């Protein structure tokens, strides 16, 4: 195996980490590889189809679907940061990852997680305006505001990750650093640090509080107002129609927030247990797979656009007949 540490000025300098991953028998490793490869490819395909459907269907050129396309684009990269390395480790005896590779993976993972927290909050605000202020919705949710909010999500995610990385990358690690995880995450890295982690922990806690708590408050406040508005609608059909416009997003929010909060709201020493790996699989692998399915099942406009997109692309030039009406 590659040399793991170097000696510089009587202090070990880490050049590699070892990802312990999922230690099982070789037969199960091959089974896991097949399952996670299928999930990874399916996740990419689902999200790509949603992006193509939204781009090609003029009826979906609305703020709600603009943000949905951002979410699909984000999750394609989100799973790509994690899955390829995990798949390679299933087939390889060498579970090492270079220090620079680990920091790069961590940076983009934190970027996408933070961006998704904020994006889901903005999508909740969009549903709040649509249901609680329907007449002013076109005036409030302009193309300029949507573009600013979308760009702001990515900027906040990139800056939050950059600040965290300044502190994480400066930590010192002892001996052969073995990370009890299948990818480089902040808490496992803090666990294998041998000194000077308190400042990094404090910065991580403060930024995590800001990035999780503020969007969560926006989501809760938005859906509280939405629920109050829906309950005031006199007809059952009207209530059902209003709720159906936000049911998909609410389901996605519950899935993502519940799994990530379970992990990041717990003390870092809990990463010593394998249960957190299972929870991490939920929000790094399963949730990105389920999100497009949820939006397709609960949203008739997305389903219609997907049928139109797949039909047009599958039938070639004859697909232009779909626009003849």
Image (spheres, rainbow, N blue to C red):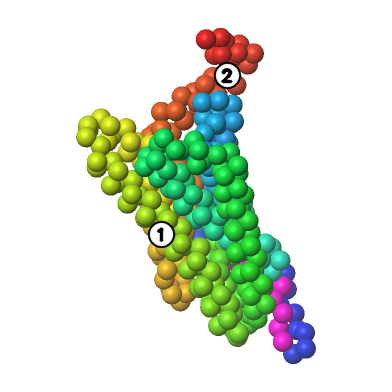
Q: Which residue is mark 2?
A: 312
**Residue at 67 percent of width and 62 percent of height:** 104
Label 1 element class: helix
Distance, label 1 to label 2, CA atoms, is 42 Å
**Residue at 59 percent of width and 31 percent of height:** 55
Is residue 324 shown left or right of residue 98? left
Q: What range is drawn magenta here? A: 11-19
Is residue 124 shown left or right of residue 97? left
Q: Position of residue 151 (x, y in %)?
A: 62, 49
Marks 1, 2: nearer the viewer = 1
Q: Position of residue 214 (x, y in %)?
A: 46, 62
- Category of crowding for the residue at label 2, using alpha-carbon neighbours closer than 10 angstroms: few (below 14), some (14–19), many (at least 20): some
- Residue 244's place in the image compared with 188, above or below, is above
Q: Quadrant of residue 166?
A: bottom right
> Does residue 37 appear anywhere in the picture?
no
Does the magenta portion include 29? no
Is residue 56 shown left or right of residue 209? right
Q: Which residue is mark 1?
A: 217
**Residue at 72 percent of width and 79 percent of height:** 13
Tell which of 157 and 46 is nearer to you: 157
> Does residue 66 appear anywhere in the picture?
yes
Indicate which disc, 1 or 2, sits on the residue closer to the N terminus.
1
């Amino acid at each position: 195996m590659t040399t793991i540490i170097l000696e510089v000025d009587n202090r070990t300098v880490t050049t590699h980490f070892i990802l312990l991953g999922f230690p099982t028998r070789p037969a199960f490793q091959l089974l896991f590889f097949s399952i996670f490869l299928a999930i990874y490819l399916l996740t990419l395909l689902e999200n790509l189809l949603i992006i193509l459907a939204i781009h090609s269907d003029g009826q979906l050129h609305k703020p709600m679907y603009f943000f949905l396309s951002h979410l699909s684009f984000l999750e394609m990269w989100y799973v790509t940061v994690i899955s390829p390395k995990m798949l390679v480790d299933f087939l390889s005896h060498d579970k090492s990852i270079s220090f620079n590779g680990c920091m790069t993976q961590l940076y983009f993972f934190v970027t996408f997680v933070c961006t998704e927290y904020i994006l889901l909050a903005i999508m909740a605000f969009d549903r709040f305006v649509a249901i609680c202020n329907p007449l002013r919705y076109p005036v409030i949710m302009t193309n300029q505001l949507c573009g600013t909010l979308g760009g702001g999500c990515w900027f906040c995610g990139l800056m939050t990750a950059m600040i965290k990385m300044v502190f994480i990358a400066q930590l010192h690690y002892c001996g052969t650093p073995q990370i009890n995880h299948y990818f480089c995450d902040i808490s496992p890295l803090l666990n294998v640090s041998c000194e000077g982690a308190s400042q990094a922990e404090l910065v991580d806690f403060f930024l995590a509080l800001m990035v999780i708590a503020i969007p969560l408050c926006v989501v809760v406040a938005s859906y509280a107002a939405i629920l109050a508005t829906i309950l005031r609608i006199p007809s059952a059909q009207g209530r059902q129609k209003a709720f159906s416009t936000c049911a998909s997003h609410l389901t996605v929010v519950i899935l993502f927030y519940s799994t990530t909060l379970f992990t990041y709201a717990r003390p870092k020493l809990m990463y010593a247990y394998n249960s957190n790996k299972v929870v991490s699989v939920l929000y790094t692998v399963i949730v990105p797979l389920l999100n497009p399915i949820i939006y397709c099942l609960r949203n008739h406009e997305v389903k219609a656009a997907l049928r139109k997109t797949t039909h047009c692309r599958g039938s070639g030039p004859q697909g232009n007949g779909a626009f003849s009406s």
